[in-house]
Amino acid sequence: MPTQRLVQHKRRSLRYPAIAGLALCLQLACPLQVLAESEPTSATPLIMEAEEYALEGNYDAALPLYEKAIAGLEGQPHRQNQLRYRYGIILNALGGQRPDLYPLARGQFDAVLRYIESSPGLPFEQSAARVRSAIAHTYHQQSALQTSPNKRAVMLRNAYQLYASAIDQLRREEDWQNLAITSFNIGQVCEWQGNLEEAIQWLEQAVALDRRHGFADLEEDLAYLTALREQVNPEQPVGNTAI
């Protein structure tokens, strides 16, 4: 199956569940330097120690330290939610090896979304649309590991609804890169649901955005789109140049 993508703010091609990409994942979530400069001294060492453990692969040691740091920031909601978002990204990246972490990742993102929506206009590094897309991505990834057809269908439906709810806001914000990523992801969800016609429509939007803005995933997205078109019309040759 083609690679899923997670909405980010700097680089697009963060691939899961490859744990080799965890260092990049940590950089993308929210720069540690920003957190360290603004957090109280008691939280900073906890986070640094947690990330050392995470990069070593010692997640049993790392995760309680993140949670302790988050709890220690209770009186500083902005900083606490910065760290929650970062922690959610890390949990999502580890979910391929530890599927039990996906619900915990969703819990972090849900808390961040509540924080953003409770104070409209409050400056925050992530928009509500990005956070919804991140929640969708946890369902999207977890569905690939689900053996129960009914549970898998529910997860895919949840992913679809959350991705779709993020699309319009990303477009209004002119967040073109994350709009392209989300269009790709919702297209893949449609394919996994067996709805190839709609999958093609979303992939066409992703490819159009790639072309218009020069995004690096154009070749990969176009190849995926071409493969889907060939599944729908196996008798008709499909080139890889037209949208």
Image (cartoon, grey):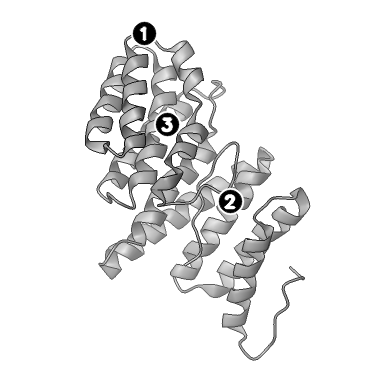
The image quadrant of residue 107 is top left
CB-based contact (under 8 Å), mark 2 and mark 3? no
Going by the picture, which residue comes out furthest to the bottom?
A: 235
> In x, y percent, where is residue 30?
49, 28
Callout in the foreground (2, 1):
1
* Residue situated in front as seen by the camera: 79 or 170: 79
In the rendered view, would you say 166 is above or below 56?
A: below
The tag on residue 41 is 1
Identify the mark nearer the N-term, 3 or 1.
1
Q: Which mark is residue 86?
A: 3
The residue sitting at 46% across, 49% down in the picture is: 162
Residue 179, relative to residue 36: is it above or below?
below
Q: Is residue 209 visible?
A: yes
Marks 3/1: CA–CA distance: 18 Å
Q: Residue at x 41, y 12 (%)?
A: 39
Tags 3 and 1 touching, CB below 8 Å: no
Residue kind at label 3, given as amino acid type? Arg
- Mark 3: which secondary structure? helix
- Residue occupied by mark 2: 181
Q: Is residue 178 above or below residue 87?
A: below
Q: Mark 2 or 1 closer to N-term?
A: 1
Q: Is residue 175 left or right of residue 14?
A: right
Sooner in the amino-acid sequence: mark 2 or mark 3: 3
> For the residue carrying disc 1, how many other residues have a C-alpha within 10 Å: few (<14), some (14-19), or many (20+)?
few
Direction front: furthest residue: 56
